Amino acid sequence: MKIAISTSGEDLSAPVDTRFGRAPRFLIYHMETGTFSLKENKQNLNAAQGAGIQSAACVCEEQVDAVITGNCGPKAFAVLDAAGIKVYTCGSTAISEAIDQLRQGQLHPADEANVEGHWV
Amino acid sequence: MKIAVASGKGGTGKTTLSCAMAFAAQEKVTLLDCDVEEPNSHFFIRPEIEHQEQVFRPVPAVDETKCTGCGECARVCQFNAIVTVNGKTLVFNELCHSCGACVRICPTGALHEVDQPIGQIETGRRDHVRFVSGRLDVGQAMSPPLIRRTLEQADAESLTIVDCPPGTSCPYVTAVKACDAALLVTEPTPFGLHDLKLAVETIRDLGVPFGVAVNRMTEEKNPIQAYCEAEGIPLLIQIPEDRRAAEAYSRGEPINTVMPELNERLAQIPEQLKAMI
Ligand code: SF4
Ligand code: SF4
């Protein structure tokens, strides 16, 4: 199982970024091997509109099964949902902590966006 | 001639001034309410509505049986309004600018345009004023197509006054750049000056000649006057803060019925703007 975690850091000790659409990058974590890679999200960071949609498309490219982030807007959620990717929300804890919580079944998949979309 | 009545932000008296100018005009005049998110000039014009029409805009729809998930549509869209994930294509209507690029590029013909209702246009009249107003449907975010349709109703022969959307983004630009000249309405406060500066910056980029109107003037000297003098911008009218204006507003009456002394000045504005073109 592969998980994309929104973050501004570069390793497992960095905190989860609470923004999904405007997260600087995603840490792609492989549950089975415990290894990870980084996926930059800079091109979407400054998108005037639709950053959530593009960020969602960006993690879809990585063929992940789930996303861990702080807040996911309705459009990003719609894209992830269409791709069959589960969205888990959590606070800005360390990434390693969030992964542990997921392993222990303490994070729950969202069934809808938890923040309103916004217009620029 | 089309005159845009615009302001950097809402609540400065743009509608009040548009309506007063329409009533003060000595000739046939058309008032276009292009503030489609919140049209309210009809409160003051109180026209007899003669015609109502639904306005649509095209948005892409996906035929899933033909879509291969190639993602060409998402690559060509400049507005992030269409996306392909795991072989599925999703359209976000509220971000779509109806440019049609995705429909043209789709190699399998999986996309076609469907008409989405976005709002209404009402036309009517009162006395010498022909009235046209666009109203965006609740929940619609894309106003420029409706603004353009409303602007098409301008009368080429006579004077047209355009009550523009507030702010300085797309809707404002759409309305102002379709006009021959503009009147920027502001208030004599530091905030008013700040918003006026933004509106001036944008309008200079558009190359539309313009003058300024100050609403709710309290003192002789105000920051707007100093700014206009320094920038060489003609200050075309200053409407004093007056109890009568506030009362007229609350009754839904144009200010010039209670302040008839303004009529002459108001009627001159189109001529003065014309001279600047
Ligand atoms: S371009 Fe056409 S076929 Fe390709 S993903 Fe878009 S809708 Fe599907
Ligand atoms: S019509 Fe234009 S703006 Fe709308 S989805 Fe297609 S490419 Fe994007």
Image (spheres, coloured by chain):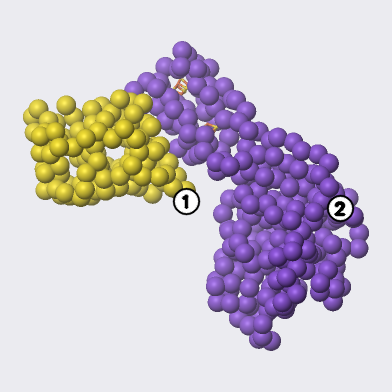
Chain colours: A yellow, B purple
Residue name at image x 14 percent, y 48 percent: A94
* Number of residues whose C-alpha sits closer than 10 Å to that of mark 2, classed few (under 14), some (14–19) or many (20 or more): few
Query: Rounded to the nearest whole Å, what is the CA distance between mark 2 and mark 1?
Result: 38 Å
In which quadrant of the rendered image does the C terminus of chain B lie? bottom right
* Between B61 and B218, the one nearer to me in the picture: B218
Q: Cβ of disc 1 within 8 Å of ligand 2?
A: no
* Residue A80 image label: none
* Both marks 2 and 1 on one chain: no
Q: Which chain carries label 1?
A: A
Callout 1: SS: loop
Residue name at image x 46 percent, y 17 percent: B64
Residue name at image x 33 percent, y 26 percent: A83
Does residue B244 appear left or right of residue B138 in this picture?
right
Q: Is B75 situated above or below B245?
A: above
Number of marks drawn: 2
Does residue B70 appear left or right of residue B167 in this picture?
left
Provide residue B222's location: percent of width, then percent of height: 63, 83
Callout 2: SS: strand
* Between A108 and B9, the one nearer to me in the picture: A108
Provide residue B214's location: percent of width, then percent of height: 69, 74
* Residue B126 image label: 2
Amino acid at circle 1:
Val
Provide residue A51's location: percent of width, then percent of height: 39, 43
The residue singled out by tag 1 in the image is A120
Q: Is A112 situated above or below B2?
A: above
User: Would residue B216 be visible to someone looking at this image?
Assistant: yes
Amino acid at circle 2:
Arg
Provide residue A26's location: percent of width, then percent of height: 24, 41
